[in-house]
Amino acid sequence: MTLRRVNVVILVLISIAFLIIVHRNLLNLSDFLKQEGSDEAPGAILPFENGFFAEHKARTGEEIPVVITASEERLGAAVAAMNSINRNTKANVVFNVVTLNESVEHLRTWLSKTDIKHKIITFEPKILDGKISSKPQQPDLEKPLTFARFYMPNFLPDTDRAIYLDDDVIVQGDIQELFEMSLKPGHAAAFSEDCDSTSSKGIIKGAGNQNSYIGFLDFKKEAIRKLGMRANTCSFNPGVIVANLTEWKHQNITQQLEMWMERNVKEGLYNSMLAESFTTPPLLIVFYKRHSSIEPMWHVRHLGATGAGNRYSSQFINAAKLLHWNGHYKPWGRASSYTDVWDKWYVPDPTGKFHPIRRHSANK
Ligand SMILES: *[C@@H]1O[C@H](CO)[C@@H](O)[C@H](O)[C@H]1NC(C)=O
Ligand SMILES: *[C@@H]1O[C@H](CO)[C@@H](O)[C@H](O)[C@H]1NC(C)=O
Ligand SMILES: *[C@@H]1O[C@H](CO)[C@@H](O)[C@H](O)[C@H]1NC(C)=O
């Protein structure tokens, strides 16, 4: 053997020794990883494992506060909406469920049978004294809980951003995406415009002008005229709100809304043909040209505008991130569109008080 050959052999031996050491270390590392996985939380290190284990693990990370109301005669709606949100995200969603004192126990029992993380907030209708008319002829439009969204900073005093949702929605997208949408500087909220193309074109036939300000406000009234708003400005739907509560408080939005509600009681400022909720007109005034826009697929609406008739294709319904059954025909009622979508998320009432009413059950 020449000296040169000996050198080569030594080099090869050193290389093999090195490879053995590296291989051992890798084996140890993979053992270590397996250990972690099986001891702590099975499935936790597999990012695609979002089924059984993920559902039952306590959610951690940044909280996403969602405000929703629950009224006794439609508690099933709020529970279905919350369930749809929970099943379609891994985020740490905390629901702030606003309800009247009479429903607290019923709601608590129902939610205790689910893994919906929640706080129950009791709404005191007295706060609305002098702000809504006490005439009983428009019970649905002036239900106290519909005004709960005006008081979000009262429920969530230390929160910067929050989402408000009507109870007649189903969320099919990941709520984190909606939560992270950007609001323009100085805007306290984002809404969906009523003349965006996806949801509204040609759909609100027969509802008059209810996609512009004139459909909601009485422009013959001095107080409204003095605001200098254009009557044909596109209105927005407050069934889905992404709010910056820091800005909301800074701009005294709640106090401004209360002021317009009080003035309406005295002066009648809303359009007398108002068919949608009484919450919209004061919001339109306060947020005139001062709100951001929610992406249209995050608020596909008017699903309750006619009875069981298909206005949207099933592909479109599948692609929607959020479905809203605003209008008269609710998916837990007798005749409605797309009830099969809603049924997927319904959680039966453990007390047996609430039942969806179905067309076929009427025939039995
Ligand atoms: C709330 O309801 C409970 C029982 O459901 C009742 O005992 C209590 O007095 C009510 N509170 C108020 C403030 O009405
Ligand atoms: C909310 O508004 C405040 C004040 O304008 C701003 O500092 C903050 O970044 C905003 N928060 C979010 C989440 O947009
Ligand atoms: C909000 O209200 C406070 C106290 O009532 C007042 O000092 C402040 O100027 C108001 N801010 C705005 C933007 O109206």
Image: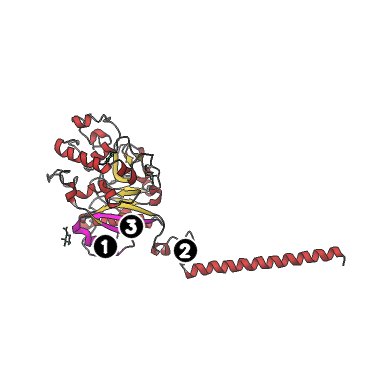
- The residue carrying mark 2 is 44
Q: Which mark is residue 110?
A: 1
Badge 2 marks a residue whose secondary structure is loop
Badge 1: few (under 14), some or many (20 or more) residues near its Cα, within 10 Å? some
> Under 8 Å from ligand 2: the CB of mark 2?
no
On whether residue 156 falls in the magenta region, the answer is no
Q: Where is residue 214 shown, x and y percent of the image? A: 24, 33
Residue 260 or residue 318, whichever sits in front: 260
Residue at the image point whose x is 31% and y is 55% from the top: 95
- CA–CA distance in space, label 2 to label 1: 29 Å
Q: For residue 208, what is the image quadrant?
A: top left
The image quadrant in which ligand 1 is located: bottom left
- Indicate whether 317 appears above or below 27: above
- Indicate whether 355 appears above or below 275: below
Q: Which residues are magenta?
A: 91-120
In which quadrant is the N terminus drawn? Answer: bottom right
Q: Which mark is residue 83?
A: 3
Q: For residue 184, what is the image quadrant?
A: top left
Badge 1 marks a residue whose secondary structure is helix
Q: Earlier in the sequence, mark 2 or mark 1?
A: 2
Badge 2: few (under 14), some or many (20 or more) residues near its Cα, within 10 Å? some
Q: Where is residue 350 shown, x and y percent of the image? A: 25, 65
Residue type indicated by callout 2: Ala
Q: Is residue 244 visible?
A: no
Asked if the residue at tag 1 contacts the one at tag 2, i.e. Cβ–Cβ closer than 8 Å, the answer is no
How is the rendered protein coloured?
secondary structure
Left or right: residue 82 compared with residue 274: right
Q: Earlier in the sequence, mark 3 or mark 1?
A: 3
Q: For residue 348, what is the image quadrant?
A: bottom left
- CA–CA distance in space, label 3 to label 1: 12 Å
